[in-house]
Every structure is written in C-alpha cells, then in structure tokens.
Image (cartoon, rainbow, N blue to C red):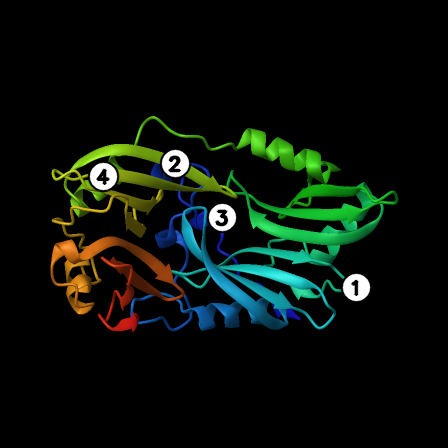
C-alpha cells in the first residue's frame, strides 16, 4: 500500500492573490521533505523517487514542464500489474499535484490516498455505477476552481469511452458522458486566448531584465497553465522574447528574436549573464554572436549561443562550464 501526499486546498492562494483560477503559487505549498539541489529545488532523481513511492512501481521516464504556472516533473511509473501511472511532482516543493493512470488493470487500486479523499477503490466503483463497463483510465487532479476531482474513464460495450467526474472529497457526481464531448466542453469553458492587458507585474519583470519597449505580449495555456511570452525591443532595435510564469513572474526561458545587434546584456538573478556566458564561450565581441537562447535542461539552465559561422556553444548558466561545442 502506498500513501499519496498531495498539496491541500487550504494551501492554495485565493484568486485575487494569484491572478486566476488556473494558477498555483509554489510558495503556498508545504515545504519539501526532500533534500534539494544547489539551486534550492527538488532534483529530477528526487522527484522520480517521490513518484515511484507514491505509485508503487518503476520509473520509466520523466520530463520537466509547466503546469498551472508551476514547474513540475512529469514522471511515468509502471506498476507490476502493467498499469502506467503518470505523476506530477512540483519542482519547488516535492508535492504531488496530479496523478493519472492509463491501461488500468482490474484490481489494481491499492494506492492509498490522503485520508480526506474518497479511496481510489470507491472512486472507481462509483464510476462504474454511473457508466457500466471496464475502467481504462483514472485521474486525480486539482481543477480550475481549486477543487480536487476524480475523472474515471470507462469503456462501454460498443467501444464508447465514457467519463465520470466526481468530487474527490465527497464522492458527489459532477458530470458524466462521452469523454470526447466532456473534453470539448472543457476546452470551450477554459479557452485561453491572447490577452490585451499585460499584467504590470509581468511588464515590470520584463523591463527590469531588459530595458526597452514591450512590443508584443501573449498569454498561452496548456492544461490550465498560463504563461506569458513578452517581446522587448531595445533602443538599438534588437528584439528578445522572454517567457514568464503568470503566477510569480518567474523567468523560465528567453531567446533572441533578431540577429543582433547584441549591445545589450541579460542578467537574470542567480545565474551567469548573457555577456558572462558569451565570455565563457570565447565569443568576446558582440558581433561574434548571431543568436542565443536561455533554456532549462533537466535541473540546470543552459545558455545556448550560436556564433557567426554556425557553431553552437552551450554554457552551464550556474557554473560557466562549456558543456557542448
């Protein structure tokens, strides 16, 4: 039996504080019980260990992604029965945000959840009461109204995949019907389109990193997560795209959008600046650079620099070590 530790509803920020129902503030999740990396974050191996213990199986792979404005490790765990469980572990806290099982096997419901939740066994049984058939998938997640829910997907005779949505704490039926129709309904209700008003917090963060004019801003969403892509034009006419989490205005990616001029610097807190990375790569003159990108690779940030002539150089943004050339 495996007990699943989840962040509690009481620890989620109210809407006015976090800028929307689709975001979660990492500072309001309980502290991680696990040791952290040098950057104060749960490492990928630690997240995999959390997921394996929670789901009771073997880790098949993991990746870092954004979910509800948080960086999470999405870990695939294969149980001995053959059920594949996907576990999302919050990078800053080690908390589990979501679990989803695919190819569910009959009787494979011995994952013990938080005491305030309906047991997995009961949730699956109630799903089959509403839609008779074989359970193929189930999911436990925090929804856009900050309520925990089960989604139980049942294959009926005739190959129809039905979905039953239950309140995870009370077991109350919220809705049920063909899975495709419910998914389309969710997309209609929670569509995230371009937003005309850039939050001042995001604007300030962008211009603090790179003085200039904000010429484009776009909100994007993925499974309820909102992020901002902001393009800043410097006084020399160069354009840079900066990507921030909507909740905390945290920079998680940046890249040049024009091939110069590179008279500017970009200096995010806690890592090497663009000019320092350029020097570490041996590209001492601004004109020796044709493009650059700051991206996250597993547990580290990496500066990827493209030199005139086409050579790519990668520099660890924390140590300055050249990792690829």
Determine whether label 1 and label 3 are within 8 Å by CB.
Answer: no
Q: Earlier in the sequence, mark 4 or mark 3?
A: 3
Quadrant where the image shows the C terminus:
bottom left
* Spot occupied by residue 135 in the image (x, y as percentages of width and height): 78, 53
User: Mark 1 to mark 4: distance in Å?
Assistant: 55 Å
Q: Nearer the viewer, residue 244 or 307?
A: 307
Residue at numbered disc 1: 107
Residue at numbered disc 4: 232
Residue at numbered disc 2: 219
Q: Residues within 10 Å of mark 3 (few under 14, many from 20)?
A: few
Closer to us: mark 2 or mark 4?
4
Determine whether label 2 and label 3 are within 8 Å by CB.
Answer: no
Closer to us: mark 4 or mark 3?
4
Q: Residue at x 63, y 72 (%)?
A: 57
User: Mark 4 to mark 3: distance in Å?
Assistant: 37 Å
Q: Earlier in the sequence, mark 1 or mark 3?
A: 3
Q: Residues within 10 Å of mark 4 (few under 14, many from 20)?
A: many
Q: Nearer the viewer, residue 137 or 266?
A: 266
Q: Residue at x 29, y 33 (%)?
A: 216
Callout 1: SS: loop
User: Mark 2 to mark 1: distance in Å?
Assistant: 43 Å
Q: Earlier in the sequence, mark 2 or mark 1?
A: 1
User: Mark 2 to mark 4: distance in Å?
Assistant: 15 Å
* Spot occupied by residue 103 in the image (x, y as percentages of width and height): 73, 59
Q: Is residue 60 left or right of residue 245?
A: right
Residue at numbered disc 3: 9
Closer to us: mark 2 or mark 1?
2
Closer to us: mark 2 or mark 3?
2
């Amino acid at each position: 039996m495996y007990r699943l530790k989840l962040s509690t509803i009481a620890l989620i920020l109210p809407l006015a504080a976090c800028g929307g129902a689709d975001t979660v503030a990492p500072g309001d999740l309980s502290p991680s019980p696990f040791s952290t990396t040098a950057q104060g974050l749960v490492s990928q191996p630690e997240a995999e260990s959390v997921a394996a213990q929670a789901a009771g199986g073997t880790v098949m792979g993991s990746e870092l992604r954004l979910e509800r404005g948080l960086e999470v490790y999405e870990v695939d765990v294969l149980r001995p029965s053959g059920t594949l469980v996907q576990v999302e572990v919050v990078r800053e806290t080690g908390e589990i945000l979501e679990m989803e099982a695919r190819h569910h096997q009959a009787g494979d419901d011995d994952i013990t959840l938080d005491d305030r939740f309906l047991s997995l066994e009961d949730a699956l049984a109630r799903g089959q009461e509403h839609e008779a058939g074989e359970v193929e998938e189930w999911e436990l997640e925090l929804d856009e109204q900050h309520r925990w829910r089960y989604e139980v997907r049942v294959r009926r005779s005739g190959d129809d995949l039905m979905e039953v949505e239950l309140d995870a704490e009370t077991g109350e039926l919220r809705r049920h019907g063909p899975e495709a129709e419910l998914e389309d309904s969710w997309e209609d209700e929670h569509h995230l389109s371009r937003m005309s008003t850039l939050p001042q917090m995001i604007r300030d963060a962008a211009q603090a990193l790179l003085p200039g004019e904000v010429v484009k801003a776009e909100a994007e969403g993925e499974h309820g997560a909102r992020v901002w892509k902001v393009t800043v034009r410097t006084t020399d006419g160069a354009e840079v795209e900066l990507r921030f989490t909507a909740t905390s205005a945290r920079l998680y990616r940046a890249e040049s959008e024009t091939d110069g001029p590179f008279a500017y610097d970009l200096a995010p807190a806690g890592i090497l600046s663009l000019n320092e990375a350029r020097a570490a790569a041996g590209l001492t003159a601004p004109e020796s650079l044709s493009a650059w990108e700051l991206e996250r690779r597993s547990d580290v940030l990496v500066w990827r620099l493209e030199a005139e002539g086409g050579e790519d150089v990668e520099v660890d943004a924390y140590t300055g070590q050249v990792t690829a050339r």
